[in-house]
Structure formats: structure tokens, C-alpha cells
Image (tube, grey):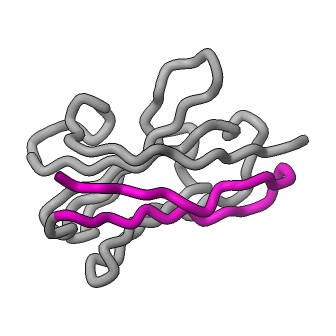
Amino acid sequence: QVQLVESGGGLVQAGGSLRLSCVASGRTFSNYDMGWFRQAPGKEREFVSGISWSGSTTYYADSVKGRFTISRDNAKNTAYLHMNSLKPEDTAVYSCAGKYQRYGRYSNSRSYDYWGQGTQVTVSS
């Protein structure tokens, strides 16, 4: 089992920034590709960003490309999501996820084996 715990969410004004963190425990973090997803009330969970086990490859949803940056520090068992130029439509619960199988699509939530509980991000206008 892998435990993932997110932090860093909060209330921010439109145009502001937040950095989300996801700390993993239970297994070797570097063995897992990581992803960030978000879910707004009444909406489906959507892919935000993904990063390979080494950090060498990253993926972004078109809606966040150029504004969000995903990164990881395997020595700290932590993945990050740096969010800049936040918009009200970014408001959602953000969850991190880990996938052990490297062939799974980053954008498909079914590719992931472990999920955190999520952290709330609210962007006011």
C-alpha cells in the first residue's frame, strides 16, 4: 500500500498562486508515476497534470498549460503542483495519485493505483 497526503490548498484571489504538495509513504516513491486530478462540485474528475517517475517527462491538460507546473523530489517522497495565474474555474478539490505501471495513460484516472484524500482550492473573483 501507498499512502498519499495532499496539502497546500486554500482560498486565493484570481490571479494568485498556490503550491500543492503530495507526500507519499509505504513504498518506494520513485517507482511511481504521479498525477494530479481535480473535481469540482457536481462535475467529473478531470486530469490536471502528470509526471514520470524520474521527473523527466511531464503532461498537462490544455486548460492549465502554461499556468501550472508539476515537479517531484524523490528524495523527499513528494510531488508538487505549482499553480499560477489562478482562475475561478480552477476551484476544485485537487487530488494526487500514483501509478506503478508506466504504460497507463496519465490522463486516465483508472491508470492510477493510489489516491490521496484531496485538498480544496478555492479561487475567488
Q: Residue 81 location, x and y as percent?
A: 51, 61
Residue at image position (43%, 62%) is: 22
- Residue extending furthest right? 125
Q: Residue 105 location, x and y as percent?
A: 21, 37
Q: Is residue 48 magenta?
A: no
Task: Using the image, determine if residue 1 lies above or below residue 69.
Answer: above
Residue at image position (17%, 52%) is: 1
26 sits to left or right of 77: left
**Extent of the magenta region:** 1-26
Nearer-the-camera pick, 56 or 30 = 30
Principal secondary structure, stretch drawn in magenta: strand
Q: Residue 114 location, x and y as percent?
A: 26, 45
Q: Choose top left, top right, bottom left or bottom right for residue 31.
A: bottom left
102 sits to left or right of 18: left
Answer whether residue 60 is visible to the viewer in this image. Answer: no
Nearer-the-camera pick, 30 or 3 = 3
Task: Using the image, determine if residue 113 lies above or below residue 84.
Answer: above
Q: Choose top left, top right, bottom left or bottom right for residue 10.
A: bottom right
